[in-house]
Structures are given as structure tokens and as C-alpha cells.
Amino acid sequence: MDRQEFGREVIATVKWKIVPFAFVLYFFNYLDRVNVGFAALQMNRELSISPTQFGTIASVFFVSYLFFQIPANYALQRLGARRWISFIIVVWGAITALTFFAQNVTHIVIARFALGIFEAGFFPGMIFYLACWFPARERARVTSLFMLAIAFSSVVAGPMSGWIVEHVHIAGFNGWRWLFAIEGVPTILLGCLAFFILVDTPADAKWLTSQQRTWLETELRQERGAQSLAERPTLKMVLGNATIWKLALSYMLVQAASQASNYWLPGQVKGFAASLSDTQTGLIMALPFVCAMVTMPLWGAHSDRTGERKWHAALPMLLAGVGFFVIASVPSLPLRLAGMAVFGVGILSFYGPYWAIPPALLSPAGLALSIAFINSCSSLGGFLANQALGHVSQRFGSYGVFMVEAALCVAAFCVLVTMQIPRQAPRAETSTEPANA
């Protein structure tokens, strides 16, 4: 077996061992985050929760999620990915399951705040973990496969959660309580499994042969060059890096647009035709995610194959803006449906190439904290976008759509003006020599 074929075999083995399990973990991460919206169909009435109180319930998660990103990744650096990720999964699963016993709005608020604390470390921790296992030329595709869980869960979560709330009434308890239990208990079990399945570094992977471990460690070590993971990361290292601020601003803006669309799109879709039922509206809302499930891995694979990152991250942002404009401005129903598909493709396909950029630009020592800081901006973007869109729409009507357009355009610009990103070696290459920019 030649070196090129051997390298492909090693990467394929690592993918099958890590990516499917990471996908499942992210699927339940998303479920446990959004299930309160479906629970509210019964919970708000049973616990006498007012709309204002439910607004607090919905937003308090993002407060703790924002402020605990960086502390969580300090813990990741100290404890290692396997221990920390498995721990936080078990805890947030337990919090979700214990919400079954909530008796008032205070209990729900406390549960959501605690959930944000422990979910804060998962996504940046997993992005860092993938960077520790895959060479740069593989990361866009791997990240896209991991983040397919967003699209998949967006399609599956609604029907599944709605069915549980409506039909599961065991031992006299309403379905909203069983929703938290049914989606929380499997998460606890997955967290326990993660402790045994996840492996911190290739050197510890018993499912790789000694030759495979040596090849992968050499590949990753040569990418890092003189940089060392042993260098002590500091918050000053992160906040003093202009590149991180550009990446954080772009991510904040694209997530602001995404969150604003979640708020704005259902009403727009309902207005596509007077005859649309709620069920039909829900099916149309699944269209962007179904399309994205096809394009995300393909776009990530193309980024890896060419070794290009910036345009692969920026173009989907601009494409999402085009789709958003068509939905809002074109009266033709077929074109609006096409706009939905284009928007979904753009707003999700940027993830893989985008999250391949930080490991290519940033020191391995500060990578986990840098990813945490960038990701924390998504919460800030979502909060600010929904606040601003509400005020703009109330004062200027449909012109609020241009705020989303502007956010996506500026986000793409921030990515494109980021410092020169080294062009990684194409996926077919197995040379351990770093590629020239």
C-alpha cells in the first residue's frame, strides 16, 4: 500500500470512529436546547406562564451560554476533551430530565439558565476536538458532516417533539413533562458513552495501529510547526488578536441574520398563500434544511478539495442574503420557495469552511479559547438582532429585511478581509509539507 492510499485509510478510520458519534451528540444538544418551545404548547397553560415570563425563559439560556463559553474552555484545556465533554453532556441531560418536575416559572428559568452554563462548552469544545484529530485539508468536510445535525434536527425535532407533547400522557403527567424526560435521559446515557468512546489524542487511540498513529501524529505536528499546545493560553492572547475580532464579528452578524430569520420567516411563509395551513407552513419551513443537508457536505468537500476557505465561507453568506431578499420581495410563490431553498443552502453551508479558518490562522495554544470567544458572539448576535428587528419592523415595516441583508453582507466582508489564510494541501495529497498560501 502506497503512502497516499495509507493516508486515506487512516483518515477514513478516524472519520468513522469520531464523526457519527459527534453528530449524535450535537443532535441531542440541539434538541435539549429548543424543546422548551414545543413544551410551551402545554407548559405555559399548566404553570400559568405569561408571554412576558416565557420571553424570560427563552432568553435566559443565552445569557449563561454567552458568559460561560470562555470559562468552559478553560476547563476543557485543564481536564481534556474526553472528561470535560462527557461531564457537561451528563449534567445538561440531567437538567433537561429533571425539568419534568418543575412546578412554577422560577423552576423553569433556573433550569434554562443552568442548561446554558453546561451547553456553553459543547460546540466550541467539539470544534477544538475535531481540530486535534483531522489535518487542515479535511476539516471543512468533517465540520460540515458534524454540523449536519443542525439541519437534521431542524427537520426531525418539530414533528417528534410535537407528537410527544400531544400523545404521551403517562401516569397522569402531561406530554410537556415527558418531552423533557424522553429527550433528557438518552442524553445522560450518551454522556456516559462519550467518556469511553472519545479519545483525547491520536496517541491514545487503541483502535489505530501504531503505524496509523505515527502517520496522523506526524501529519498534525508538522501542521502546527513551531507552535505548541503546551503554551499556556490566556484571555489576553485571545482578545489582543485582531483576526479573532474579525472572525467574531462575521460570526455574530451571520448568526444575527439566522436568528432573525427564525423569528421572521414563519410569518412570511404563512403569508405565501391564504390557503396555507399550519401543517403546510411547517413543511415549507423544513425545505431550507432539507436542501442544506445535501449541500453542506458537498460544499465542505469542495473547500477541502481546493484548499480554499475564505470564499467558501463568504459566498454562502451572500447567497443567503439573496434568498432572503427573494422571499421578502418577490410575489411569485415558486420563486419564494426557491428563495427558501437558496437561503437554507447559504445560511448553513458556510459552517464547514468557516470553522476550518480558525485552526488555520490561530495558535493551537489559544485555539479552544478563541473558538469559545467567537461562538459566544452568536448569542450576542441573536439577542441584538431580534431586539433590533422588532423595533425596525414596528417603525419601518418590511424595510426590516434590509437589516438582515446588511448583516450578511458585512459578515461576508469581514471574512474576506481577514488576513491571508494559507491554502491547505488538497485532500488527495498526503505530503506532510505545509502548502504555500
Image (cartoon, grey):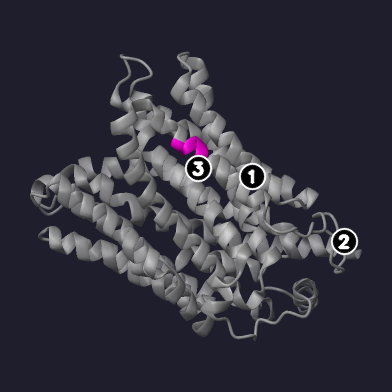
**Residue 110, x across and y down, in percent:** 21, 66
Task: Please indicate, yes or no, whether residue 340 appears anywhere in the rendered image.
Answer: no
How far apart are the alpha carbons under marks 2 and 1? Answer: 31 Å
| Magenta highlight on residue 308 | no
Q: Is residue 132 left or right of residue 253?
A: right
Residue at (27, 46) in percent of width and height = 37
Numbered disc 2: secondary structure: helix
Q: Which label's residue is closer to the chain start, 3 or 2?
A: 2
Picture coordinates of residue 35, whole percent (x, y): 30, 50
Q: CA distance from mark 3 to mark 2?
A: 43 Å
Mark closer to the chain start, 3 or 1: 1
Residue linked to disc 3: 407
Q: Give the residue displayed 46% in from the left and 77% down from the top.
A: 84
- Closest to the camera, between mark 2 and mark 1, is 1
Q: Quadrant of residue 348?
A: top right
Q: Residue furthest front?
A: 395
The residue most toward the right is 2
- Report which residue position mark 2 lands on: 4
Which region is colored magenta? 403-407
- Residue 410 in the image: x percent, y percent? 56, 44
Amino acid marked by disc 3? Ala
Q: Which mark is residue 224?
A: none
Q: Secondary structure at mark 1?
A: helix
Alpha carbons under labels 3 and 1: distance apart: 12 Å
* Pointer 1 residue: 314
Count the labels in the image: 3
**Residue drawn at (66%, 58%), measured in percent from left and top?**
356
